[in-house]
Image: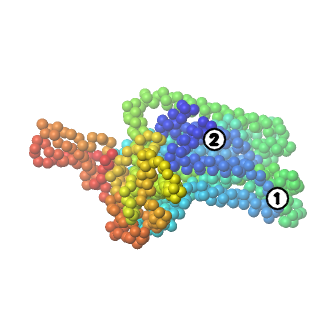
């Protein structure tokens, strides 16, 4: 249990794996709960059978995509303005591919289970069976044949059709269905093994490591930003309420606002990086700036440049056209120079 | 028990996952309620449709309202909507955001009920047994029965024990037909809902993401501020009660002329702390005024200015009014870069 808890807390990817697993288990349980109620009417069987095999998997696919955090992050990364940070299409591809892989697990499980079980294939294709394969069906008229074949999936119609015909056709279709099911399983496992083994050989491992690093970075950055906003929320509210009580007109104003600050899980109070904000439009500016202008991935914003004994400070800011950064500096006591770096 | 504790801890780690947990529990409760419910079709021509559709639509409405009742933020939304403007203007986009997120969560349990009902099929069989196409499903075409009589017989299809129309149509065939249609409708409903949920969640960042960040922040702020104010008032009430009772006992002590009242130093320190916690509000009238003002005239969201509250909601300061609009027109971006 502790190991499971530790795994769950290890990051977004672990949570997404667990969510995909839970969805797969739900899909297996749902398949076992739902019975295939073949309509046994000419014309309806195929629609029902194919529908039963493909519509629930689509539901699971959309559910899997919806609950996945990387899907939303990929959209946000795609939509955001470039700002101070160029977009890396490899990150978006990484996120989308990992999302889709996890979301496909539950639908594929449903399809494989329905193929191995065979009932939906029997329902869908009982009318399309070649009557020449079965001796008992060779001497029936076309309309009789149509009705007969449509009723094969339903055991309750045994008084109308010969049990042996029903069993023969069912067995034939079930064999085909199971063969298809097992070959799909085999193919998927082979594909997964080949992909896993050949991926390091065919792709650039260094680039792949970089992409995976920056994907995780984007996730952590969003989480940290949200956390900083929420911490500031609390502190802003605290200050606003203390101001409210301070502003009351009464004689006894010698007091301390004595409400204990909320402790986060027994740790120290979180540092409020937005402590300098005193009014709402400053915060709106921060939020807009975060969206419109993502900062560059460079922590050396104030770089020290040592030029022949004279230290100068560089600080890069975006220029008006928003297509690069400019900085101004002096060298050796000369006049101010500007440098330009394109995004 | 360990498992539950772990799940509970995980769910309580933040507000959003707690609300998601509540939604999940309501959805499971709704599915369980359906399985526990005893479905009794009346098997009468005019009542079947009413009963079937009633089972399909009335419990979802009840579950939807229950979803709103169980959501803590409903009273917050109502308060924010109803409060006088005071020194803090209201932002309709924040109210809209809160209402939308509450509605989305409240819709989950009704959707689960409708899906489970349709996928089970009994409701459809009950409602539409009189409308089945007899030309496709019937056993014989030349029955000499009036329409009324036919409807009466077909209405008994959902009830296995009393069905007596085997010559007209086989009960199994009709039930199977209706159940198939019901399942098809059910799966399409589930597919539509899931697809819509996917669109809303995955495609929403494409629209007004900056404005969304702001409304999300400010709606969370309103919630936090309210909770913190309630916490403050609770602490104040505790200290007020403590000091009130202390003063009463001291008064009684003096009145009854008892001597040997021994106050220790620590007691005096505690008293001082408690008095400080009163925040200068020491009588009922002042406290009532504080609470009334909090509702009638919320203070501005500005930590720079010292505003005097005199209990009059019309104490407007033009300077403050400018600063109180939560949603501002977009500014130029060139000047900003993050300090993080």
Q: On residue B56, which mark appears?
A: none
In depth, the one of B129 and B46 nearer the eye is B46
Question: Which of the chains bears the disc numbered 2?
Answer: A
Judge left or right: residue A4 versus residue B183. left
Give coordinates of residue A301: x percent, y percent.
27, 43
In depth, the one of A322 and B72 nearer the eye is B72
Judge left or right: residue A251 versus residue A153. left
Q: Which residue bears the numbered disc 2?
A: A27
Query: Mark 1, residues whose alpha carbon is within 10 Å: few (<14), some, or many (≥20)?
Result: many
Does the rendering let one see residue A135?
Answer: yes
Q: Which residue bears the numbered disc 1?
A: B43
| Position of A202 relative to A96 (above/below) | above
Give coordinates of residue B250: x percent, y percent.
50, 55
Does the rendering let one see residue B119?
Answer: no
Judge left or right: residue A51 versus residue A85. right
Q: Residue at x 19, y 46 (%)?
A: A339
Q: Residue at x 56, y 30 (%)?
A: A189
Q: Residue at x 88, y 60 (%)?
A: B143
Q: Quadrant of residue B141?
A: bottom right
Image quarter of the N terminus of chain A: top right
Say which element carries label 1: loop
Question: Which of the chains bears the disc numbered 1?
Answer: B
The reply to whether discs 1 and 2 touch (Cβ–Cβ < 8 Å) is: no
How many discs appear?
2
Query: Mark 2, residues whose alpha carbon is within 10 Å: few (<14), some, or many (≥20)?
Result: many
Give coordinates of residue B156: x percent, y percent.
84, 57
């Amino acid at each position: 249990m502790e190991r499971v808890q530790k795994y769950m807390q290890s990051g977004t990817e672990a949570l997404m794996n667990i969510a995909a697993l839970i969805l797969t288990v739900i899909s297996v349980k749902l398949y076992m709960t739902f019975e295939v109620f073949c309509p046994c009417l000419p014309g309806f069987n195929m629609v029902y059978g194919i529908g039963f095999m493909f519509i629930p998997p689509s539901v699971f696919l959309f559910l899997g995509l919806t609950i996945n955090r990387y899907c939303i992050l990929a959209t946000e990364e795609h939509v955001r303005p470039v700002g101070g940070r160029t977009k890396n299409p490899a990150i978006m591809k990484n996120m989308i591919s990992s999302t889709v892989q996890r979301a496909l697990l539950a639908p594929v499980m449903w399809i494989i289970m329905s193929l191995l079980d065979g009932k939906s294939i029997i329902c869908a294709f009982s009318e399309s069976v070649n009557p020449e394969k079965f001796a008992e069906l060779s001497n029936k008229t076309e309309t009789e044949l149509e009705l007969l074949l449509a009723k094969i999936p339903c055991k309750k119609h045994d008084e109308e059709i010969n049990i042996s015909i029903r069993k023969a056709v069912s067995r034939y279709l079930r064999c085909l269905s199971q063969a298809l099911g097992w070959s799909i399983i085999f193919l998927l496992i082979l594909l997964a093994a080949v992909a896993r083994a050949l991926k390091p050989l065919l792709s650039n491992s260094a680039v792949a490591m970089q992409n995976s690093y920056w994907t995780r970075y984007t996730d952590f950055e969003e989480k940290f930003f949200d956390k900083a906003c929420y911490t500031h929320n609390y502190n802003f509210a605290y200050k606003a309420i203390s101001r409210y009580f301070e502003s009351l007109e009464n004689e006894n104003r010698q007091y301390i606002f004595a409400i204990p600050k909320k402790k986060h899980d027994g740790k120290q109070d979180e540092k409020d990086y937005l402590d300098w904000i005193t009014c709402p439009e400053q915060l709106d500016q921060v939020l807009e700036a975060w969206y419109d202008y993502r900062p560059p991935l460079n922590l050396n914003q104030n770089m020290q440049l040592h030029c022949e004994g004279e230290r100068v400070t560089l600080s890069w800011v975006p220029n008006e056209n928003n297509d690069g950064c400019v900085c101004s500096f002096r060298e050796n006591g000369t006049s101010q120079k500007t440098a330009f770096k394109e995004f | 028990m360990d498992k539950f504790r772990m799940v509970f801890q995980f769910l309580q780690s933040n507000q959003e996952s707690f609300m998601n947990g509540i939604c999940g529990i309501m959805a499971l409760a709704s599915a369980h309620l359906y399985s526990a419910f005893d479905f009794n079709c009346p098997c009468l021509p005019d009542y079947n449709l009413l009963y079937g559709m009633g089972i399909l639509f009335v419990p979802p409405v009840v579950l939807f309202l229950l979803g709103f009742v169980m959501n803590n933020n409903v009273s917050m939304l109502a308060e924010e909507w109803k409060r006088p403007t005071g020194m803090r203007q209201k932002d309709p986009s924040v109210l809209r955001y809160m209402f939308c997120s509450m509605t989305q969560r409240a819709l989950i349990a009704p959707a689960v009920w409708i899906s489970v009902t349709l996928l089970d099929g009994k409701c459809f069989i009950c409602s539409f047994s009189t409308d089945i196409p007899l030309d496709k499903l019937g056993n014989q075409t030349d029955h000499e029965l009036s329409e009324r009589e036919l409807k009466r017989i077909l209405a008994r299809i959902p009830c296995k024990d009393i069905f007596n129309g085997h010559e007209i149509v086989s009960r199994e065939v009709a039930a199977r037909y209706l159940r198939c249609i019901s399942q098809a409708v059910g799966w399409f409903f589930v597919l539509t809902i899931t697809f819509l949920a996917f669109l809303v969640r995955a495609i929403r960042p494409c629209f007004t993401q900056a404005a969304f960040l702001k409304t999300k922040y400010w709606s969370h702020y309103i919630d936090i501020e309210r909770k913190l104010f309630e916490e403050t008032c609770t602490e104040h009430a505790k200290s007020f009660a403590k000091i009130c009772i202390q003063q009463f006992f001291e008064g009684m002590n003096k009145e009854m002329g008892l001597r040997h009242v021994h106050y220790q130093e620590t007691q005096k320190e505690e008293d001082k702390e408690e008095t400080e916690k009163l925040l200068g509000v020491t009588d009922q009238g002042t406290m009532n005024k504080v609470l009334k003002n909090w509702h009638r005239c919320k203070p501005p969201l500005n930590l720079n200015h010292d505003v005097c509250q005199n209990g009059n909601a019309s104490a407007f300061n033009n300077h403050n009014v400018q600063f109180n609009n939560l949603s501002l027109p977009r500014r130029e971006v060139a000047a900003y870069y993050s300090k993080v």
